[in-house]
Image (cartoon, rainbow, N blue to C red):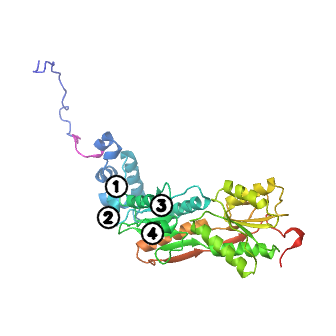
């Protein structure tokens, strides 16, 4: 009996004449990596199991061309067996970039922001980048400052901002020196790189369409105060009426939602002279259509309605909605293109790129009652 009180047992040794094979007694070989679990496998483990060099494993994991297809399959099979995952941080240091774009926005409830974010994510993925979303709970200076402060803790190469630029200026934001910035829908082209929908051109097209049908003037259901897009559309509406020598009715505002369009629509339905309404987005136009219907004002026989966005459901409104089409996919693509060009130092430091809108005429607009009221 040994000093621990245990009875010794006989452990058979290797058979006589047997060759001494490799024994893994704690090294970092692939067999031990399999036992330790997925997180412990190294590039050397993969190389040993696949029978290739570590350089070949590196080329396969980084997607480089020039690796024999059979070798590539061997390496990928070894990676899968060992649960190997490339070290993204190490690769980022080697490349000098993280291949990640941050997106800061304070609202995911509006159609424009959601579709722009979707387009940015799709375009970034096409370029081999991922998107990190930094939501801002409420549009205050402190919240915006906090979002940009978090950039210093995250591995991002660039940031696309979907919010009103005055919040950036008021928040006295200090950006990490390596981070490039592009702003969506803003008039700050003299301070930032900006990608913007043609807010003014789309609004003028809406007014001209309705005046061309014979309406004496056009009422405007605008977006919320403080919104650049809402202000740009309202300014263009007013200017288009002035250029045509037509009176501008009082501006009424919603908050981009269908509910606000309905509330304001009840007021507009009570205006007998209101025969044409340009709503600043399709959601508010939807609420407006409901209000007019409930008050017995038929569209377009009594009142013509035009929206802005051309959301997927616009053609299914009752009646189908005439609207201005925004190319959100192009906005997202141009945002990603702009930040990549800035990162590679081949793009301008500031300036604005405008994405055109397109009038889509459907059944919600027609001549006013009596066949015309233009003077």
Q: Which of 103 and 6 is in front in this view?
A: 103
Q: Any magenta on residue 178?
A: no
Residue located at (76% from left, 55% from top): 291
Q: Can residue 317 be seen in this view?
A: no
Location of mark 3 (residue):
104
Describe residue 55's horizontal placement relative to residue 359 as left or right.
left
Location of mark 1 (residue):
87
* Residue closest to the far right: 370
Q: How far apart are marks 4 and 2 (CA)?
A: 34 Å
Q: Do the residues labelled 2 and 1 touch (CB within 8 Å)?
A: no
Q: Any magenta on residue 27?
A: yes
Q: Do the residues labelled 3 and 2 touch (CB within 8 Å)?
A: no
Describe residue 100's horizontal placement relative to residue 16 as left or right.
right
Nearer the camera: disc 3 or disc 2: 3
Q: Distance between the residues labelled 3 and 1?
A: 27 Å
Could you say which disc has been placed on residue 94 in the image?
2
Range of residues picked out in magenta: 21-30
Q: Distance between the residues labelled 3 and 4?
A: 15 Å
The image position of residue 168, as x and y in percent, is: 46, 67
């Amino acid at each position: 009996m040994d000093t621990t009180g245990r009875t010794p047992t006989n452990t058979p040794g290797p058979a006589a004449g047997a060759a001494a094979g490799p024994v893994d007694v704690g090294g970092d070989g692939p067999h031990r990596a399999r036992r330790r679990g997925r997180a412990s496998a190294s590039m050397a483990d993969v190389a040993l199991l696949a029978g290739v060099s570590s350089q070949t494993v590196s080329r396969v994991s980084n997607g480089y061309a020039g690796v024999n297809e059979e070798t590539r399959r061997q390496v990928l099979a070894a990676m899968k067996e060992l649960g190997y995952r490339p070290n993204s941080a190490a690769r980022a240091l080697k490349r000098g970039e993280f291949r990640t774009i941050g997106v800061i926005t304070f609202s995911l409830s509006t159609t424009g922001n959601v579709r722009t974010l979707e387009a940015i994510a799709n375009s970034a993925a096409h370029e081999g980048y991922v998107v990190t979303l930094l939501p801002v709970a409420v549009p205050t200076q402190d919240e915006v400052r906090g979002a940009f402060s978090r950039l210093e803790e995250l591995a991002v190469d660039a940031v696309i901002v979907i919010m009103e630029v005055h919040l950036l200026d008021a928040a006295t934001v200090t950006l990490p020196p390596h981070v490039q910035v592009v702003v969506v829908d803003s008039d700050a082209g003299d301070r930032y790189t900006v990608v913007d929908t043609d807010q003014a051109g789309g609004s003028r097209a809406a007014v001209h369409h309705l005046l061309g049908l014979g309406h004496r003037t056009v009422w405007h259901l605008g977006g919320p105060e403080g919104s650049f897009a809402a202000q740009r559309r309202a300014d263009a509406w007013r200017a288009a009426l002035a250029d045509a020598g037509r009176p501008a009715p009082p501006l009424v505002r919603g908050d981009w939602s269908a509910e606000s369009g309905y509330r304001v629509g009840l007021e507009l339905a009570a205006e007998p002279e209101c025969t044409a309404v340009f709503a600043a987005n399709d959601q508010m136009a939807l609420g407006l259509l409901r209000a007019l219907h409930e008050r017995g004002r038929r569209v377009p026989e009594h009142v013509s309605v035009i929206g802005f966005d051309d959301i997927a459901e616009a053609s299914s409104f009752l009646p189908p909605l005439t609207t201005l089409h925004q190319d959100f996919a192009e906005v997202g693509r141009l945002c990603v293109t702009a930040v990549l060009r800035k990162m590679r130092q081949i793009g301008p430091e500031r300036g604005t790129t405008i994405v055109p809108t397109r009038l889509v005429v459907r059944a919600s607009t027609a001549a006013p009652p009596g066949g015309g009221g233009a003077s």
